[in-house]
Amino acid sequence: MRRPFALLAAALLMSAPAVPASAADGDEGFTVKDPRITESSGLAASRLHPGVYWTHNDSDDGPYLYAVDSATGETVARLTLTGIGSPRDVEAISIGPGNRIFVGDIGDNLGGTWPYVWIYELPEPKELKDATVRATQYVVKYSDGARDAESMVVHPKTGRVYIVDKKEEGGHLYEGPAKLSATGDNVFRPIAPVELWATDAALSPDGEQLAVRGYFGGIHYSWNGGEPQRKGRLSVPLQGQGESVTYSADGSRLMYGSEGTQSAVESREAPGGGGRKGSSAGGGSAEGAESGGGDGTGGTVKAGGVVVAALVLLLVLRLTRRRRPS
């Protein structure tokens, strides 16, 4: 979501580490160059097109998805979705079995008052070019009432959809029905706590690891057959407005995105040390110390000036939690 502290964040983060150079295999950092992408709020690695990442804007853009080539940062395709009405607050994107793209229109700019939200599903195109694609729309409700959320994952084996709600004090992982229905309500139920003010989440390509990120940190869980077990902290880069995370297509890296024009996508080694290039791109281990604050700031940022910036930015976040209408 757009926030009034965006320019302040950019100024505070001038001392943050530079983004590493792009790489054709898509596991290094890159910069999103398309001027139409100003609020990149979700990120998903393509399985069909190595090195390509799908993203979308947050609000006020329209029913569009963008395919970005990580080797150049350029958009190589824009999809226009039909059959779904007008998107309201698109916050997440994930790829499920059979190269099906799921889009989470699950944000709530009114602070958790909308009685329902939506998920859209469409096939990932085999050819990357601008196209119009018909999507299936699903109505989503929560068993315990309306809420704001920005994180959605689709299990790569079962196709089941999960959502993490967004609460500063921590939220829950919600499980959807075994199969979504396009003709009725799809009720999501809480199955596990998530100790984070979550802005996005991702499941590893093998479905065995869950990564959840916030503005200043993240947590790694083993999936454990749908009963997540916390394993440690993630080395999340400090970004102007950290909104997205995805595993690289081979599962070796975690890619972290941010909102804003010319926004950076930064790479870190995925938990378990599976990165082919070690931690050179990420500048550190995928897991930090298990001690520290609830939003994962401990063990992630070491430069004194950046720590101060993070604390100031956290204060601004808390003072500006009231969202604008959509």
Image (tube, rainbow, N blue to C red):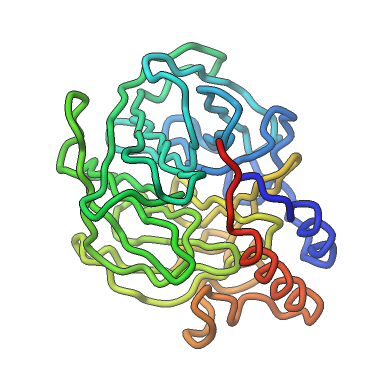
Q: Is residue 221 left or right of residue 166?
A: left
Q: Is residue 74 left or right of residue 175?
A: right
Residue 303 placement: quadrant: bottom right
Residue 34 placement: quadrant: top right
x, y percent for residue 36:
69, 27
Q: Residue at x 43, y 55 (%)?
A: 201
Comparing 41 with 49, the one in front is 41
Comparing 110 with 184, the one in front is 110
Label tally:
0
Spot the residue most to the top: 132
Position of the N terminus by quadrant? top right
Compared to residue 141, the image places residue 17 above or below, namely below
Comparing 24 with 283, the one in front is 283
Q: Is residue 2 visible?
A: yes
Q: Residue at x 75, y 40 (%)?
A: 262
Q: Is residue 323 left or right of residue 145?
A: right
